[in-house]
Amino acid sequence: MSGDHAALLAQLADKQAITEVLFAYCNHLDRMELDALAALFTEDCVVDYGPEPHLHSAGSAGLRRDLERMWRWARTAHLLANVTVSLGPGAGRAAALSAVLAWHERPDGSTATMMGHYVDELVKVEDHWLISRRRQELLGNDAGFTVNINPFERLARPDGG
């Protein structure tokens, strides 16, 4: 195998691993597996889901704590699509852009749907990739565009509530 071929295979493997991290995020969030979700981020990550202060998280522990706000929803389904991964600049660094459709069901049964982008920066730590920075760009929220989308069953709340 030539060096160029081996390098190409390594790049493809990194892009696949990064894509799996992004899909794992949605899976863990819908199941409210917040410890597993936080493990996908660097300890010093910065996450911005919107302009309000409560939508900004610093550090994976802060992100885990801040995402507990998702318990206000009865169910969610975060669907990722059109993932584009760019490796570099520099070894062990990458950027990703993905479209996300987030469906939320309130306890009263009403629903809301959000469409947006995740803009991520990632770093390779040892042999795996972690998100070091995430920004969500909201493209629209149309409560009339809602369907039931096979949501995951949630785990029991840690506080029993």
Image (tube, helix red, strand yellow):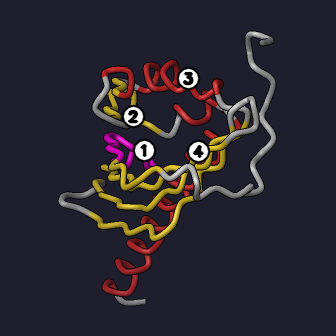
* Residue type at the position of mark 4: Ala
Q: Secondary structure at mark 1?
A: strand
* Residue type at the position of mark 1: Leu
Quarter of the view holding residue 28: top right
Residues at discs 3 and 1 in contact (Cβ within 8 Å): no
Give how far apart the Cα atoms at labels 3 and 1 are: 23 Å
* Residue type at the position of mark 2: Thr
Q: Where does label 4 land, which residue?
A: 112
Q: Earlier in the sequence, mark 4 or mark 2?
A: 2
Q: Main secondary structure of the magenta part?
A: strand
Q: Which label sits on residue 69?
A: 3
* Residue type at the position of mark 3: Arg
Q: Earlier in the sequence, mark 3 or mark 4?
A: 3
Q: Where does label 1 land, which residue?
A: 130
Instruction: Pick the quarter of the image with the C terminus.
Output: top right
Residues at discs 1 and 2 in contact (Cβ within 8 Å): yes
Quarter of the view holding residue 29: top right
Within 10 Å of disc 4 (Cα), the crowding (few <14, some 14-19, many 20+) is some
> Which of the two discs, 3 and 2, sits closer to the camera?
3
